[in-house]
Amino acid sequence: MDCSQLEFCDSTGLNVLLGARLKAEAAGGGVHLVAMRPVVARVFQITGAEAVFTVHDSLESALAD
């Protein structure tokens, strides 16, 4: 998921992403987050959600992974 234009994420947004991650994993996939802005990345750090998502600095690095 390209997060480069995401300027805000609260608990509701975080819960949506966590739900999407669970559904993706149940189907054999996953959710990778790309290009998070510092303010959004901070929410993931504070909540510990960064530990359950794969986060990439750029789309290129995500595609290479």
Image (cartoon, grey):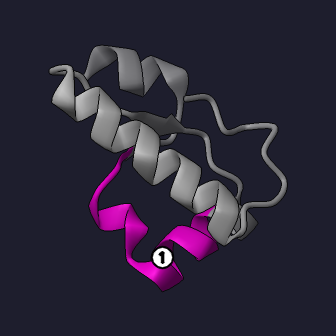
Q: Please indicate whether residue 61 sits to the left or right of residue 25 in the image.
A: right
Farthest residue to the bottom: give it.
Answer: 46
User: Relative to 39, does residue 18 appear above or below in the rendering?
Assistant: above
User: Relative to 7, does residue 62 appear above or below in the rendering?
Assistant: above
Check disc 1 and report its element: helix, strand or loop: helix
Q: In the rendering, at what x and y percent does residue 16 appear? A: 56, 49
Q: Which residue is identified by label 1?
A: 45
Looking at numbered disc 1 in the image, what kind of residue is underneath it? Gln
- Residue depicted at x 15% and y 21%: 28
User: Relative to 47, does residue 56 appear above or below in the rendering?
Assistant: above
The part of the image, by quadrant, that contains residue 64 is top left
Foreground of the two, 33 or 64: 33
- Residue depicted at x 53% and y 59%: 15
Q: In the rendering, at what x and y percent does residue 50 appear? A: 39, 64
Q: In the rendering, at what x and y percent does residue 6 appear? A: 78, 45
Q: In the rendering, at what x and y percent does residue 54 appear? A: 32, 45
The part of the image, by quadrant, that contains residue 63 is top left
Please give the range of residues in magenta.
41-54
Instruction: Say if the magenta span includes residue 44.
Output: yes
Q: Please indicate whether residue 40 sits to the left or right of residue 14 in the image.
A: right
Q: Residues within 10 Å of mark 1 (few under 14, many from 20)?
A: few
Instruction: Say if the magenta span includes residue 65.
Output: no
Foreground of the two, 22 or 62: 22
Q: Which image quarter holds the C terminus?
A: top left
The part of the image, by quadrant, that contains residue 9 is bottom right
Foreground of the two, 13 or 43: 13
Q: Which image quarter holds the N terminus?
A: top right
Foreground of the two, 63 or 46: 46
Question: Magenta segment, principal secondary structure?
Answer: helix
- Residue depicted at x 39% and y 26%: 61
Q: Please indicate whether residue 62 sits to the left or right of residue 58 in the image.
A: left
